Image: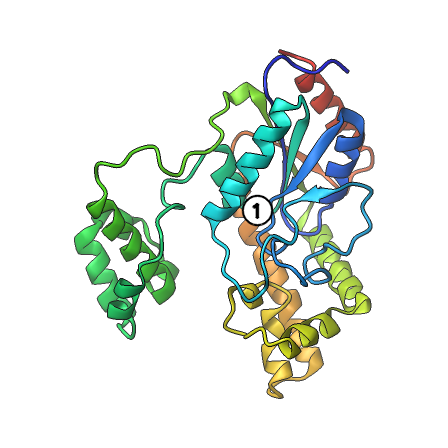
């Protein structure tokens, strides 16, 4: 297939357990592409089973193992990494395939997010430490009334989100003369193709049930134990990941193994619903039902038409 004269990006997204990585590998084989993971859990080293990196996929996937599990990793760091990789592929005439379920990662790369480059302000965080959500929200409302008005009930009760919002508002006030921060690729609409994988809720629930079972059989419990033995704290950013944090009470002797697994499954379902809500708001996505046979051929046909057209 001829390489287009213009740079193009294929995005494969959707909720957890729908087979995005496997489809990406298939598309990479057909179109000579390279895959970049857009999964906020897969950036951590030594976290393979719980994040799905242990799957035997016949392709290299960029974006794995970027940072140690006891280190923090921001959206800005991911965006910078992914943009560098994608631009390298552009210069080599290779189709980059961005795939994953972390919608914020995908948005940061494709569209840009102005706030991702705002650094942590440790001094400010110390000042805000211990303040009640009501106090934090009042401070935010005075600094950025539009942001405060856009927050839902959950956001208003979440100290971490409120502190970050105040941090961003403070940075904006101090840097009003700065422009062009947080930019993404900026490709014209026709040069980015969004493929979304979905299925009816009952089917998605069954996929999650199967995935949890497979990861248990693969040894995710031992993987978490090794991280703890290595000295990775439960307070580390990596350990807040889905499939890991639900085991905290179990390892502390406060919950049974069955309770940990049940909590994990419930949180996977909640996460799937949040992902669907996020992605359904993006009207650029072309949706395919993975519960129907032959969807892969339909995806390939759409990609072929898009990729062959300048």
The x and y percentages for residue 282 are: 51, 35
> Is 51 displayed left or right of 214 in the figure?
left
Question: Against 164, is 77 above or below?
Answer: above
Residue nearest the observer in this picture, 5 or 188: 5
SS class, disc 1: helix
Looking at the rendered image, the quarter that the N terminus falls into is: top right
Location of residue 27 (image quadrant): top right
Looking at the figure, which quarter contains the C terminus? top right
Q: Quadrant of residue 299?
A: top right
Give the tally of numbered discs. 1
Q: Position of residue 70 (x, y in %)?
A: 55, 67
Side of 218 where 157 appears, left or right: left
Which residue is at 61% across, 58% downward? Answer: 44
One can see residue 281 in this view: no
Residue depicted at 27% across the width and 65% down the height:
123
Where, by quadrant of the figure, is residue 177 drawn? top left
For the point 80% across and 46% down, the residue is: 57
Residue pointed to by mark 1: 276
Instruction: From the top left corner, tell me how far across and down residue 193 is, in percent.
Output: 61, 27
x 57%, y 46%: residue: 276
User: 7 or 272, which lies in front?
Assistant: 7
Specify whether residue 165 is in view: yes
Using the image, determine if residue 130 lies above or below residue 74. below
The furthest residue to the bottom: 253
Mark 1 surroundings within 10 Å by alpha-carbon count, few (fewer than 14), some (14 through 19), many (20 or more): some
Where is 13 relative to 187, above or below?
A: below
- Front position in the image: 54 or 195: 54
Place of residue 284 in the rendered image (x, y in percent of width and height, measured from the top left):
54, 29
Colour treatment of the image: rainbow
Residue furthest to the left: 142
């Amino acid at each position: 297939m001829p390489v287009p004269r213009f740079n193009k990006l294929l995005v494969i997204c959707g909720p957890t357990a729908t087979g995005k990585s496997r489809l990406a590998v298939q598309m990479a084989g057909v179109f000579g592409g390279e895959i970049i993971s857009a999964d906020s859990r897969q950036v951590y080293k030594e976290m393979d089973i719980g994040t799905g990196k242990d799957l035997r996929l016949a392709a290299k996937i960029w974006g794995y193992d970027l940072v140690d599990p006891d280190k923090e990793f921001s959206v800005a760091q991911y965006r910078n990494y992914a943009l560098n990789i994608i631009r390298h592929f552009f210069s080599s005439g290779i189709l980059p395939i961005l795939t994953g379920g972390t919608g914020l990662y995908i948005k940061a790369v494709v569209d840009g997010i102005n706030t991702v480059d705002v650094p942590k302000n440790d001094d400010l965080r110390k000042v805000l430490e211990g303040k009640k959500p009501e106090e934090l929200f009042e401070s935010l409302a005075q600094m950025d009334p539009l942001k405060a008005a856009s927050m839902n009930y959950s956001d208003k009760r979440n100290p971490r989100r409120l502190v970050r919002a105040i941090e961003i508002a403070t940075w904006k006030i101090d840097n009003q003369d700065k422009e062009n921060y947080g930019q993404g690729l900026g490709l014209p609409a026709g040069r980015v193709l969004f493929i979304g994988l979905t299925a009816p809720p009952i089917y998605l629930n069954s996929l999650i049930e199967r995935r949890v079972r497979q990861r248990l059989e693969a040894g995710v419990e031992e993987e978490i134990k090794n991280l703890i033995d290595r000295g990775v704290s439960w307070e580390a950013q990596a350990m807040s990941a889905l499939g890991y944090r639900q085991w905290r009470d179990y390892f502390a002797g406060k919950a049974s193994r069955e309770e940990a697994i049940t909590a994990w499954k419930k949180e996977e379902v909640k996460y799937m619903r949040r992902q669907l809500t996020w992605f359904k708001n993006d009207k650029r996505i072309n949706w395919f039902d993975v519960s129907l046979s032959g969807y892969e051929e339909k995806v390939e046909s759409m990609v072929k038409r898009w990729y062959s057209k300048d």
